[in-house]
Image (tube, grey):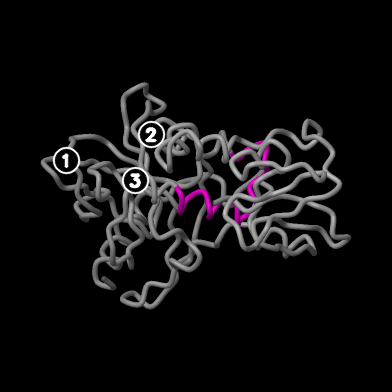
């Protein structure tokens, strides 16, 4: 794998160009991409029109582009590359300037985040696997890994759905349906801006039962928690000084602040 990545570095260097050097305009905290550390194990790929209007396979976790300095052990120096590269899949192999970066059954141009290889999900759809991944996942699980990554990074609620929609076949709605049918789709209804949520003074879920939650002392199905509280990750709650109990999270004053996306 180290030899493969060294070959890739040479190809990627040739693609580095004068694009932005950081993620500008985002409120999230993403990994520095100098290694696979904290990157999702797999991400879904999706075919959509490129800037030219032609169909293209996108296997990326964010639209923004930046420079990344990576140590090349073979050359004994830092190499500056962009965090996304373009290539072509033909006759089953996907390549970037001769370096193979995966396999896909369709002939198509692609864009790929660094530290990933193109492959197939267990149900035959396009997925990019982290270069150190050792297992194959379903397309919906790749979507879940990407969503957890976004939540852990703190992607704002008002950007979460639109960011995910660009990276999953059928978008947020399809992912929810595939996760578990209509009930799951209801449970994970996209969070509205906080000003549109009803006031929640009390929230409690029975740790001994699967579907026994109360909002403002009124019994509410777990599938409908998203109507009252925003989805949040446990790490986000910690960053904000809060804590989580069962599937609910509370701020430093023990006021309900969100629920854990299942």
Q: Are marks 3 and 1 in contact (CB under 8 Å)?
A: no
Q: Please tell me which of labels 1 and 2 falls first in the chain.
A: 1
The answer for how far apart the CA atoms under marks 3 and 1 are is: 16 Å
Residue at image position (42%, 38%) is: 168
**Whole-Å distance between the Cαs marked 1 and 2?**
17 Å
Which residue is at 43% across, 66% downward?
A: 36
Sooner in the amino-acid sequence: mark 3 or mark 1: 1
How busy is the neighbourhood of tag 3: few (under 14 within 10 Å), some, or many (20 plus)? many
x and y, in percent, of residue 42 in the image = 38, 55
Residue 152: within the magenta? Answer: yes
Name the quarter where the N terminus is drawn.
bottom left
Secondary structure found at label 3 = helix
Tell me which segment is drawn in magenta.
Answer: 144-160
Q: Secondary structure at mark 1?
A: loop
Q: Is residue 211 magenta?
A: no
Q: CA distance from mark 2 to mark 3?
A: 9 Å
Label of residue 139 in the image = 3
First in sequence: mark 2 vs mark 3? 3
Image mark for residue 169: 2
Q: In the image, residue 250 lies at what x, y percent?
A: 78, 58
Nearer to the camera, 82 or 136: 136
């Amino acid at each position: 794998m180290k030899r493969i990545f060294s070959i890739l570095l040479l190809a990627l260097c040739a693609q580095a160009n004068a694009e932005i050097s950081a993620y500008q305009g985002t409120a999230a905290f993403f990994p520095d991409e100098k290694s696979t550390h904290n990157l999702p194990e797999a991400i879904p790929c999706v075919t959509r029109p490129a800037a030219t209007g032609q169909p293209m396979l996108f296997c990326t976790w964010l639209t923004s582009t930046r420079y990344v300095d990576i140590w090349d052990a073979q050359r004994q120096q830092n190499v500056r590359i962009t965090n996304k590269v373009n290539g072509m899949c033909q006759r089953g192999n996907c390549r970037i300037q001769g370096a193979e970066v995966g396999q896909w059954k369709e002939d198509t141009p692609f864009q790929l985040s660094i530290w990933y290889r193109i492959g197939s999900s267990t149900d035959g759809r396009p997925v990019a696997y982290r270069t150190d991944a050792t297992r194959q996942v379903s397309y919906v699980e790749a979507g879940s890994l990407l969503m957890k990554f976004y939540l852990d990074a703190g992607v704002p609620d008002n950007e979460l759905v639109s960011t995910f929609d660009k990276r999953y076949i059928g978008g947020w709605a399809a992912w929810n349906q595939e996760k578990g049918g209509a009930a799951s789709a209801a449970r994970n209804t996209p969070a509205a801006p906080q000003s549109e949520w009803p006031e929640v003074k009390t929230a409690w879920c029975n740790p001994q039962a699967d579907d026994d939650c109360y909002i403002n002392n009124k019994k509410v199905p777990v599938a409908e928690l998203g109507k009252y509280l925003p989805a949040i990750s446990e790490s986000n709650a910690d960053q904000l000084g809060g804590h989580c109990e069962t599937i609910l999270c509370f701020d430093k004053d023990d006021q309900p602040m969100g629920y854990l996306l299942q």
